[in-house]
Amino acid sequence: MTVDGSVDTTVDEPATGPLATDGAVTAPAGGRTGRPRMPPTPASPWVSEALRRSREPRIPRIPRIPRIAGAARSPAFVVTLLALCSFAVSLVLQTTLFRDGTGDADEAAYVLQARMLLQGRLTLDASLVEPFFRPWLTGVHDGRVFTKYLPGWPAALALSQALFGTMAVAPAAMAAVWVAGTYRLARELFGEVRTALTAAVGVALSPLVIMHTALPLAYAACAATLVFASAELLRGLRTGARSALFLGGAAAGFALLIRPFDAVLVVLPVAVLAMVRARRELRILPRRALWAVPGTLPMVAVFLVYCWHVTGSPLRMPLSASDPLDRFGFGPRRILPSESSFMFTRRLALEALGDTLAAAPSWFFGGMGLIVLAAVGLFAPRRRPERIMLLATTGVVLLGYAFWWGSAFAMPGLRNGLGPHYHLAAFTPVVILAADGARWLWSVLARVPSRIARPGLAVAAGVGLVAITLPTLPARVDVQRGVNAGNAFLESMIPDQLDGPAVIVVSPPVPSRYAQIPYHTLRNSPDLGGPVVYAADIGSRIAELPDRLPGRKIYRLRPGEVWDPAVPGGFRGAFVPLRQVIGTRIEIQVTLQPPPPQQPTTTPTGGPLLYVRLGDQQRVLRPADGRRHTFVLTTGPATGPDELGTGPANGADGVALPADLIVGYATGTGPGAAVWEERIPLARRAGGDLSLLAPGLGWRRLPAGPGAAAGPGADQDAWPWISAATQSVLRVDLAPTRP
């Protein structure tokens, strides 16, 4: 071996045997020929390394550790980390800011349906829930109560509850799916990692996504599923990947089971783009699309069977089956037959669309800055069909929901409530366009000679987007804190321990036949088997409740009750035990403690009045302060001046029951009079006895302000009644007596 490490391949030969410069061999002087002497050639590197190692002691080989830093820089790692962060943020928000939801009673409907599925129920027995326990957003068919929503999202909530012991995992999982699906869709449309990562970040940081993926509502779940379905279907139709087609078909079918209208609006632009891409070989699309059918077909079958089971027709969806007026288009619209209707006009639709477009930018990360980037992305070069497809998706969703009457009802909450929740399917296309617009601007700035230009502008743009987004958050957080404060107040009114199984009658200031309106956290189990059951105060029929649920203690929850409406900041809310009073003859003992005289703004007419009223019967007298007076309620006709009868008299029919027995005190007549009333529900039992639920509801009417009409002809009903306690002035005791 030579000094430089090369191998010497020469052979000892006579010195007189030189090589010719052209490579020919010349004979030496003695005429003898020999083997040519080859010049030394360097050895290959691996030979040198092998010889070196042969002289060194053998050391055991240590496996190479992968480069973690390199893996952390991979797009898959970044997207996975981002999706996990969105998952975690959703869980945190569900246990903190949105622990009881947003106050939207629709959340209770989804949770109820999930609980029904966990119990193996698709419908409820109408005879069990009517009339006191009818859940919100339900319809009735053949004696069975069904929810207005399809079972896709409630099934996901139920699965989350079954696997993890909480429904919170399902919305969090949708947050992760939305982020990952956005990355895949943007990558499929533009083939740019930077565009895809930027779009995923934009979705993850948008306030609308953050809020809705922390709620049990179905809007975010459908939007996230459709983003994933679009990505997989486009990839499968382009490449023929069967797994992508199957997953895309399954995701589209699942979206059909959540919000069918959204699924149709989003899949149509996807199908058009696929045909544009394959316009030179359209014949391959049907063959490829067939691989999506195994994923979609089971979902379609579930859709048809479910509709058939709950509404009686596979093509009649629960939404419209619960009320024919709950549909798209213009005219009279309402959500349920029990609710009032309103006229949805073209003018109202345009106003709703305008308000939606005005409020929507503030729900994106970056606000109007992101909208500007989306405009840049729309007109950026290359991939023109893909950009038009994103624009078309947003456009058809906006246009489609312009015909939905619920968009008009959503206007008050567009800024700081639920936001443009009906239009969530139009959200991701705008973010993807903005991400590619930012990428194109970045590539344009690469031509700028200065090395500081691009990094500096990137930092400034990021800070600007954050600065635009942050000011929109405090008002929304304050609104939610107000909702949480109301829920906390409601919870504080109900004792942690009640004396045995209980039924709580829920009495809101505005009457409602649903316990979830307006108190959406008061929810029953589907079988009404919980230790506490909430009943809606549906009026005088509530007197039948004790016979409906024997063995349960009865309470009344009245969060809107005011102790004294004449005093600002008076105590609000009441939780009182109720008792059933049964008999054929019941004494009504009234004790008065009139308030001290005040200087009224309008002088009442006449003196104080004490009265008892049932239907058309009324007994009125001039009371003395602190004196007790007794009236009598009987099952037969009235026989005395202080009696009220419920039976027929003089050939006339008796009082139609159930009805309210009203005991009242007024400081006079006319608008200047203050009035206290206790309204006690009264019903007739199957055996003919009377049943009252005491104490009744207290109501107050304050004296009218200056300038109000006075005198016997004044319209006292023009002044509103206030749900207020009356015990300080008017005390009513009921006691059954023998004839």
Image (cartoon, grey):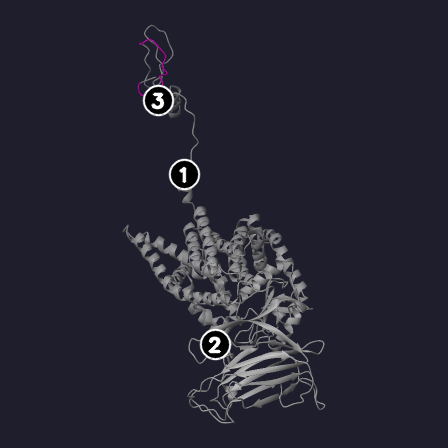
Q: Is residue 620 above or below residue 222?
A: below
Crowdedness near tag 1: few (<14), some (14–19) or many (≥20) residues, C-alpha within 10 Å? few
Q: Position of residue 552 (x, y in %)?
A: 62, 67
**Disc number placed over residue 521 in the picture, else none:** none
Q: Nearer the viewer, residue 383 or 534?
A: 534
Q: Quadrant of the C terminus?
A: bottom right
Q: Position of residue 456 (x, y in %)?
A: 30, 54
Q: Nearer the viewer, residue 462 or 695?
A: 695
Residue beneath disc 2 = 563
Q: Is residue 104 above or below residue 641?
A: above
Distance between mark 1 and mark 3 Cα atoms: 35 Å
Q: Secondary structure at mark 1?
A: loop
Q: Is residue 23 above or below residue 696?
A: above
Residue beneath disc 3 = 42
Q: Residue furthest top?
A: 30
Mark before the other along the chain sequence, 2 or 3: 3
What segment is highlighted magenta in the picture? 3-15
Mark nearer the viewer, 1 or 3: 1
Q: Position of residue 77 (x, y in %)?
A: 44, 46
Residue beneath disc 1 = 67
- Amino acid type of the residue tagged 2 in the rendering: Trp
- Amino acid type of the residue tagged 3 in the rendering: Pro
Mark nearer the viewer, 2 or 1: 2
Q: Position of residue 325 (x, y in %)?
A: 59, 74
Q: How many marks?
A: 3
Distance between mark 2 and mark 1 Cα atoms: 70 Å
Identify the residue shown where x is 62% and y is 58%. Answer: 117
Taking the image as shown, residue 87 lies to the left or right of residue 40, namely: right
- Amino acid type of the residue tagged 1 in the rendering: Arg
Quarter residue 641 falls in: bottom right
